[in-house]
Amino acid sequence: MPSSPSSSPSVRLERLRAALPATIEFLQRRRADLIDPVLIDDYVAINWFEWHGGALRLTVTGRNICAQLAIRAR
């Protein structure tokens, strides 16, 4: 069965970029329990987040994506 347009890699990445600020906010407030587990899995799979000692944290790639988003927001 062909994949739907909403499941394309570019749509997936845009969805993850859009959710990233809220995800980071939850992490900063120590409320990772409010983050959709599917988002966490996706972020880890594309190396924007990593598990470190049982805690979720941004990778260098994730920090770079955040910087790009901040530039776009200006």
Image (cartoon, rainbow, N blue to C red):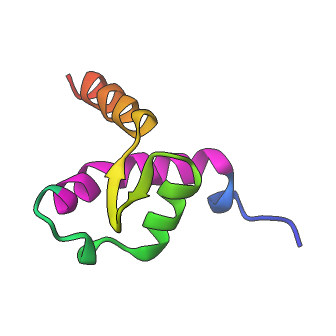
Residue 5 x/y as whole percent: 69, 57
Q: Which residues are magenta?
A: 9-27
Q: Quadrant of the C terminus?
A: top left
Which residue is located at x 66 percent, y 61 percent? 7
Residue 54 x/y as whole percent: 35, 68
Decide: is 36 above or below 16.
below
Choose top left, top right, bottom left or bottom right for residue 25: bottom left
Choose top left, top right, bottom left or bottom right for residue 34: bottom left
Front one among 65 and 60: 60
Residue 59 x/y as whole percent: 40, 41
Q: Is residue 50 magenta?
A: no
Front one among 60 and 15: 60
Which residue is located at x 32 percent, y 52 percent? 57
Main secondary structure along the magenta-highlighted residues:
helix
Which residue is located at x 14 percent, y 66 percent? 30
Q: Quadrant of the N terminus?
A: bottom right
Q: Is residue 4 left or right of residue 26?
A: right
Q: Is residue 26 magenta?
A: yes
